């Protein structure tokens, strides 16, 4: 059998082109590997990327041509004539350096001296600046062709626009460029300025420019593919920006964070720039109108100006640039999180007042890349400082869990541990429902055990105070690792529990008299726990004395501890009485005795003998609503850092003092309770300073400076991320949307 022309001496097929491969069945060489399907998809991707880029360039082409016609007072300009104008202008720019002269204030001799000095600086590689605008002048490259400015803001699908200045690669010759520009558009009338989209796509399909050449020279792969939504560095500055002068990072960050900011109208900025730079070209031989273009990138504004001939180009930025990103965009994304606000509400607020802001994609990328690592490190430093200060000291902990949503459909549970003495939060543990097999009632136990395992390695835990959670109580009772830790229940939860049972029993008609005794019974539970002196037998005897007191018996022979009993109050006056006594042996008295002498209730009294209260945890859970409201849904990263921010806020202001009047008198505020129907005076604390926020914001800027790669880079998933278990909380495969649409039925559809 003869060898084919494409085979070598060994019988194997040769690769006719370097860097290519030939399929097993021969045929056309594959440009992207031996896999034919992969090669076809790659070629299609490149072709589509080229079309997308040319489609965007086509719109800019039409606007530039209209601006050229307007400046030259022409009624018609063909695409060929306009392409020839651009090529001639481009050739002129490539042969000389562009230096701007101040015709109003500088003499010709001084201008010549400045030009000579700038030429020397340019040869040395130093940055040159415009003395009129303090703007670094861009060094002209061999193939740099700035387009004329157009005073419009193009928004694509509601996203912030990038700069519409394009560059042509060195691989693109002038003839190929002219041919491509002629293919980009046809002559069109004034009624349809941008033409029909179908015609545009036909023109793009007929493009003669090489796909590989376009992808290499225009960097289509970076501009179009590999990014989702607003991934094209939407809130970073465009690629071709002048390099900023090197400066000290920390003073610059302090200026960005601490400097005052205001809201300015765009029209006022344009008015100011026109007053400074004028409305006509300063070149004496030109005197054409200057065109000003506004480009919005998030909350930042870039204004560029130039005449149609490209004379006296300039630009101005409304915000400082920090590592190719507007400082305001980084401040907004970080400030929304650090202040505990919601992106949805802030975006709605910005739209309401017409204020430019960042996109949702930019917010979440900033949270993931910069805010989350900074908050984690800041909290770890604060936590280690608190825990290391204990040494060998025995610590009494208080713990409580809180779900992220009301009802029984929670996704996250955060368990918080505080020090009963200092009232500071020592640890917070977050558990996702996927970690417990989708059963949300089991999240609190898992979070509790994780937190206790961590804290028992750091400090010596003597006692733990929780609510009467059955799973946690069982774990503290049966687990060997917790056998040296005393477990106590919160006295507030205990009093609330017994009051709820009595209130339920008092709904019956014959027991309604017990409703007036509810506050007294609840207060007596607190008194019994406080005076028990850590003796559960004494607490039991003291508390059950209410069964004698309620029937007007204030001394009795034997109590539950085997000793004579007596009420601790002084002699009561009948005039001070507001409740009537119960009759001994009556139905209300027997009902109360049944509730108070229940076996489970009496066995649990030992958990209240140390008189522990977790009111600080209830206050913290209420404070956590500021950072993570239960009516909002968050991702795992967002929910975790919001919990840590709430802890940082709480610990930073834990030592606040009570506010005072001018004369030093403590201040109080009046508060009304709907449940009791009474007013009470509460101490008024000093205002929070939030002194840690500037430090956090500065660390976020440093994180941006030290992070390599763009804003849209891929970040590896953490080891503890619940998405490693399952991408969704349903733990079930998601059916196709077409099947769900077919099965969808509405009760409000008209019946046939």
Image (cartoon, grey):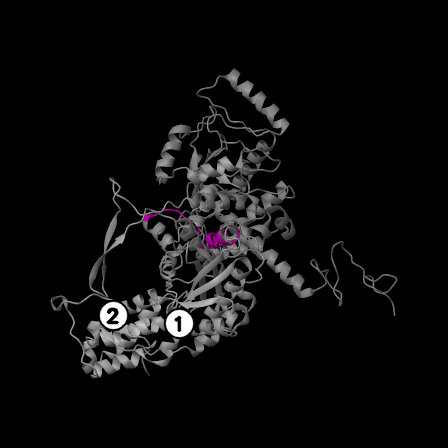
Q: Position of residue 566 (x, y in %)?
A: 26, 71
Q: Is residue 435 left or right of residue 642?
A: right
- Residue 567 is tagged as 2
Residue 713 higher or lower than 134, as above or below:
below
**N-terminal of the two: label 1 or label 2?**
2
Is 737 contained in the magenta span?
no
- Residue drawn at 46 percent across, 64 percent down: 463
- Which region of the structure is painted magenta? 353-369
Crowding at label 2, few (<14), some or many (≥20) Cα neighbours within 10 Å? some
Quote the CA–CA distance across marks 1 and 2: 21 Å
Q: Is residue 75 visible?
A: no
- Residue 656 is tagged as none
Q: Position of residue 506 (x, y in %)?
A: 23, 78
Is 357 contained in the magenta span?
yes
Q: Position of residue 100 (x, y in %)?
A: 51, 27
In front here: 689 or 686?
A: 686
Residue 25 higher or lower than 86, as above or below:
below
């Amino acid at each position: 059998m003869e060898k084919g022309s494409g085979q070598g001496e060994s019988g194997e097929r040769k690769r006719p082109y370097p860097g290519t491969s030939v399929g097993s069945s021969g045929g056309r060489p594959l440009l992207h590997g031996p896999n034919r399907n992969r090669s076809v998809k790659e070629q299609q991707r490149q072709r589509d990327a080229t079309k997308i880029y040319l489609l965007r360039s086509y719109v800019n082409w039409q606007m530039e041509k209209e601006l050229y016609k307007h400046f030259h007072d022409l009624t018609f300009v063909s695409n060929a004539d306009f392409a020839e104008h651009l090529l001639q202008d481009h050739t002129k720019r490539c042969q000389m350096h562009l230096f701007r002269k101040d015709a109003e204030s500088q003499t010709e001799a001084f201008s010549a001296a400045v030009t000579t000095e700038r030429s020397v600086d340019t040869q040395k590689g130093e940055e040159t600046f415009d003395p009129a605008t303090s703007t670094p002048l861009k060094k002209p490259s061999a193939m740099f062709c700035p387009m004329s400015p157009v005073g419009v803001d193009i928004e694509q699908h509601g996203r912030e626009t990038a700069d519409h200045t394009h560059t042509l690669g060195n691989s693109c010759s002038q003839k190929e460029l002219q041919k491509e520009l002629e293919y980009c558009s046809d002559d069109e009338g004034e009624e349809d300025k941008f033409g029909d989209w179908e015609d545009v796509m036909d023109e793009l399909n007929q493009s003669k420019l090489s796909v590989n050449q376009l992808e290499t020279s225009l960097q289509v792969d970076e501009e179009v593919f590999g990014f989702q939504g607003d991934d094209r560095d939407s809130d970073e500055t465009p690629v071709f920006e002048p390099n900023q002068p090197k400066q000290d990072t920390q003073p610059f960050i302090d200026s960005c964070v601490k400097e005052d900011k205001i809201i300015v109208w765009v029209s006022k900025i344009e008015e100011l720039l026109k007053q400074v730079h004028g409305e006509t070209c300063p070149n004496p031989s030109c005197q054409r109108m200057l065109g000003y273009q506004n480009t919005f990138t998030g909350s930042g504004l870039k204004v560029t100006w130039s005449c149609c001939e490209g004379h006296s180009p300039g630009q101005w930025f409304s915000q400082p640039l920090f590592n190719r990103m507007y400082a305001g965009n980084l401040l907004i994304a970080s400030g929304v999180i650090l202040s505990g606000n919601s992106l949805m509400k802030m975006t709605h607020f910005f739209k309401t007042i017409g204020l430019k802001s960042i996109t949702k994609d930019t917010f979440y990328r900033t949270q993931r890349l910069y805010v989350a690592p900074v908050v984690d490190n800041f909290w770890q430093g604060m936590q280690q400082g608190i825990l290391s200060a204990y040494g060998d000291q025995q610590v009494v902990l208080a713990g409580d869990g809180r779900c992220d949503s009301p009802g029984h459909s929670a996704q996250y549970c955060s368990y918080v541990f505080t020090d009963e003495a200092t009232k500071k939060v020592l640890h917070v543990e977050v558990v996702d429902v996927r970690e417990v097999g989708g059963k949300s009632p089991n999240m609190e136990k898992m979070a509790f055990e994780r937190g206790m395992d961590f804290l028992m390695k750091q400090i010596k835990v003597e006692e733990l105070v929780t609510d009467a959670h059955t799973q946690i109580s069982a774990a503290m009772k049966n687990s060997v690792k917790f056998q040296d830790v005393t477990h106590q229940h919160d006295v507030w939860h205990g009093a609330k529990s017994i009051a709820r049972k009595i209130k339920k029993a008092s709904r019956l008609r014959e027991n309604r008299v017990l409703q007036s005794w509810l506050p007294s019974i609840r207060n007596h539970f607190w008194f019994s726990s406080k005076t028990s002196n850590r003796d559960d037998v004494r607490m039991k005897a003291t508390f059950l004395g209410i069964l004698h007191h309620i029937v007007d018996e204030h001394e009795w022979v034997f109590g539950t501890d085997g000793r004579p009993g007596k009420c601790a109050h002084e002699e009561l006056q009948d005039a001070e009485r507001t409740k009537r006594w119960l009759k001994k042996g009556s139905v209300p008295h027997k009902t109360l005795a049944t509730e108070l002498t229940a076996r489970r209730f009496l066995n649990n009294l030992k958990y209240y003998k140390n008189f522990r209260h977790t009111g600080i945890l209830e206050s913290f859970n209420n404070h956590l609503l500021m950072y993570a409201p239960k009516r909002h849904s968050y991702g795992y990263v967002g929910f975790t850092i919001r919990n840590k921010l709430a802890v940082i806020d709480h610990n930073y202001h834990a030592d606040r003092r009570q506010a005072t009047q001018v004369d030093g008198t403590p201040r109080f505020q009046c508060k009304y309770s709907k449940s009791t129907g009474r007013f009470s005076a509460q101490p008024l604390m000093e205002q929070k300073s939030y002194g840690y926020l500037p430090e956090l914001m500065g660390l976020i800027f440093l994180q941006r400076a030290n992070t390599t790669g763009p804003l849209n880079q891929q970040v590896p998933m953490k080891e503890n991320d619940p998405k490693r278990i399952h991408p969704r909380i349903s733990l079930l495969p998601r059916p196709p949307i077409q099947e769900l649409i077919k099965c969808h039925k509405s009760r409000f559809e008209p019946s046939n």
